[in-house]
Amino acid sequence: MCLGIPGEVVEFLPDQPDLARVDVSGVRRVINVGLLADDLPEPGEWVLIHVGFALSKIDESEAAAALEFLESIGQAYADELAALAESRIE
Amino acid sequence: MRYVDEFRSADKAHALAARITELCEPGRQYKFMEVCGGHTHTIYKHGLEDYLPEAITLVHGPGCPVCVIPMGRVDDAIHLASQPEVIMTSFGDMMRVPGSQGSFFDAKAAGTDIRMVYSPLDSLKIARQNPGKRVVFMAIGFETTTPSTAMTILRAKAMGLENFSVFCNHVTIIPAIKAILDSPDLRLDGFIGPGHVSTVIGCRPYEFIASGYGKPVVVAGFEPLDILQSIYMLMVQLSEGRTEVENQYTRVVPWDGNLAALTAINEVMELRPYFEWRGLGFITHSAMRLREGFRAFDAEVLFDVPGVRVADPKACQCGEVLKGVLKPWECKVFGTACTPETPIGTCMVSPEGACAAYYNYGRMSRRRVVEVELTRP
């Protein structure tokens, strides 16, 4: 929860500029990117997501490192991914 | 996509450790606190203490969001969740945190409607789908999750949603660090600053630690080499007689934080006069509540919250662990009565808790290992 999870921006939702579809470890879900409004990520760029909100843009190598870190936590990350898979904010 | 080797190289780790060792003054002991539970996890997962010279001790700090929620707030939340027509929503991390009468999981098993959500925004959807119910979101966390709650409340207001409220338990990291600095129990030489909290608040809020208390702070990333690099940066400062705030995690943390996130928090929330932390007691201006203009979304205004105060279980020494005074294994119930399966204290519940990190990786302090070896016949 406190640790951000990396997601790759896939697309923005039509007519909802603060919502974007991201890919997190193969799970595709919609998140809110309103907190990055000053410097919105492009599709293909990576963001660090905290409980459904992108809080910072990161590069691909940081995303890989963050992902390995989360995978090392084990069950807690599996639970977080499962929760994300259930998330429907759009 | 695998680039992590650059953050994990054992050769680089040994090289950094050698430079850290060179900077140690003979006869001096150094104590650095890693504030964030994510760092604690990395330290035990990779056995970083084994790389460091004996003169350096790492002390675990209070930066585990569920660890610091007092039992009374869990009891209050379960009371709220038990009210007629209420659906409580909560992050999964919170579900096993023990209150005096059990956890959210226990309450759910007894029929209380408590639902796990990934994001506070999920609660809005649940509220829309259940117009006859009152949805209360159990908001917890440091500044990494506070902006999300603030943004969710702003969205609820914009939507005109009338059956959604927040039981706000957001805490702020700076007063907790100050409480530790003011405590006579522990003398620290510097801080490894939290990575993700700092993406929101930036590095400036730590300046009082450097200027007022004369301790260096280095905001750090979560990879093993990030942490070793941060310790090196702390040691360089001390050896040069400097005490400053430095940012090792520049690839994620901007010096000024996330202005949009800070603006959202400030619009919706204000500091409480005081708030109780598990194990640490009451700390002034250490938590957030909703502003007057958002009373319609404040569960503490809309419901009668008992304000339960419960003393921590006598056997549990989470407070000392959260303050860094005790190592997890020095707690009387660690690994015996208190395990991740049957936690007594919060430090054993969360993967970010120091006790769970110790328990899961079987790391004991070097001193204890040495003691065990010395006492062997």
Image: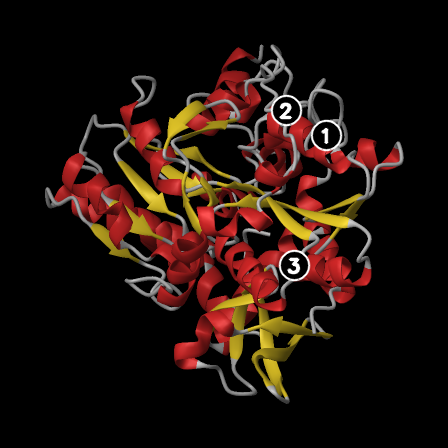
Sequence order check, earlier mark of 3 and 1: 1
- Residue type at the position of mark 2: Pro
Residue A12 appears in the picture as rendered:
yes
Number of dots carrying numbers = 3
Residue hosting label 1: B79
Q: Mark 2 and mark 1, same subunit?
A: yes
How packed is label 2: few (under 14 Cα within 10 Å), some, or many (20 or more)?
some
Q: Is residue B195 above or below residue A31?
A: above
Image location (x, y in percent) of residue A25 = 69, 71
Which mark, residue B306?
Answer: 2
Q: Nearer the viewer, residue B103 or B45?
A: B103
- Residue type at the position of mark 1: His
Of labels 3 and 2, the one closer to you: 2
How far apart marks 3 and 1 lie (CA) works out to 22 Å
How far apart marks 3 and 2 lie (CA) works out to 27 Å
The residue drawn where x is 78% and y is 48% is: B115
Q: Secondary structure at mark 2?
A: loop
Residue B324 appears in the picture as rendered:
no
Q: Say whether marks 3 and 2 touch (CB < 8 Å).
A: no
How packed is label 1: few (under 14 Cα within 10 Å), some, or many (20 or more)?
some
Subunit ID for the residue under disc 3: B
Sequence order check, earlier mark of 2 and 1: 1
Residue hosting label 3: B119
Image location (x, y in percent) of residue B252 = 40, 66
Residue B196 sits in which quadrant?
Answer: bottom left
Q: Say whether marks 2 and 1 touch (CB < 8 Å).
A: yes
